[in-house]
Image (tube, grey):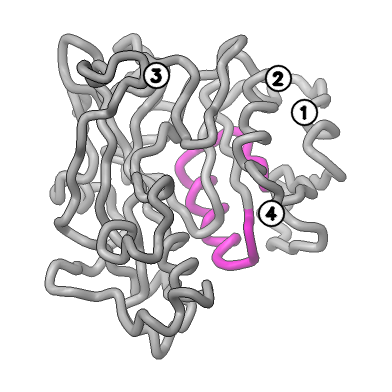
Amino acid sequence: MRYPNLPALLERTTPGFGKGPLSLILAEDEVEITSTLAHHIRHGFRDIILLAPKGVQIPPEQEARVHVVEHDVHAEGALVAAVNAAIGRFPGTWIHYCHNAEYLFYPFCETRSVGEMLAFHAEERRQAMLTYVIDLYAGDLAAHPDAVSVEDAWLDRSGYYALARKDPANEWQPKDRQLDFYGGLRWRFEEHIPYARRRIDRISLFRAKPGLKLLPDFTMSDEEMNTYSCRWHNNLTAAVCSFRTAKALRTNPGSRHAIHGFRWPNSVKFDWRGQQLMDLGLMEPGQWF
């Protein structure tokens, strides 16, 4: 169904709507919208909200499954504002968010639904999940000038690192169980990336509750939700495989002519399996098996 704005959708009273898990996908352009929707439908999100400019078209079978909302996708903080509106409307619901040409992967996603994974995560008394944004890029930019190709997708198998997250309230003590993660194209081409946008960690999955806010840097207002694990053992983490940085580097005038290829000796072809990401150490199964 289609809606003229987000409030028109959120005010619905249809039984079952918003019981989750819920995915909000913001389409900044028309690149790979169909594959993004298909990916998240396949993983079992009960409701999917596509925030898109007026006139965006998707296949009829997806139109019947997805809530399409006309949205000012280029407004400052458009995605964060939409997520916070959903938090206020659906307390207790697990919410995921991403952009088009971004794909959520989690341990054993080939055989288990996102609902099964979140049920286990909740049993471990976790209310949010750390995700790493793993940059994808086309191997042949001559064939794919915008750096986007699902069939020819590559990623970096190494070059990732973490730094202690500073606590503004205590300059001598970093935040407990919180790290700032870096790597991928934002690290290799950092001269083209603003400092504030170089981190690759994102709290992409969380359980809504009254008063909770998603902050502009994709962390939560509840500090415990920003931790990578509980105090007693490691927890599940997930990955958001994303063409967004590669696409931006190839379309922005300041970087387009300076970059002729993204592949380097540590590139590996992406096989679109969660197992590959676990083998590379890019997400953690925790105690789930």
Q: Earlier in the sequence, mark 2 or mark 4?
A: 4
Could you tell me which residue is drawn at 76 percent across and 50 percent down? 72
Closest to the camera, between mark 2 and mark 4, is: 4
In the image, 239 versus 185, the foreground residue is 185
Of badges 3 and 2, the one in the foreground is 3
Q: Is residue 107 left or right of residue 35?
A: left
Residue where numbered disc 4 is placed: 74
CA distance separating discs 1 and 3:
24 Å
Which residue is rendered at x = 49% and y = 66% of the image? 248
- Looking at the rendered structure, the kind of residue marked 4 is His
Residue at image coords 82%, 31%: 7
Q: CA distance from mark 3 to mark 4?
A: 27 Å
- Cα gap from disc 4 to disc 1, whole angstroms: 21 Å
Q: Which residue is mark 2?
A: 89
Q: Report the magenta residues as a range.
A: 27-50
Tell me the crowding category of disc 4: few under 14, some 14 to 19, or many 20 or more residues within 10 angstroms, Cα based.
some
Upstream in sequence: badge 2 or badge 1? 1
Identify which residue, 195 or 125, lies in the foreground: 195
The residue under label 3 is: 225
In 3D space, how far apart are the residues under numbered discs 3 and 2 (Cα atoms)?
19 Å
Q: Which residue is mark 1?
A: 10
- Name the residue located 57 percent from the left edge and 25 percent from the top edge: 20
Q: Residues within 10 Å of mark 2 (few under 14, many from 20)?
A: some
Q: Position of residue 252 (x, y in %)?
A: 52, 72
The quadrant where residue 9 appears: top right
- Which comes before the other along the chain, label 3 or label 4? 4
Q: Are marks 2 and 1 in contact (CB under 8 Å)?
A: yes
Q: On screen, 228 above or below 191?
A: above
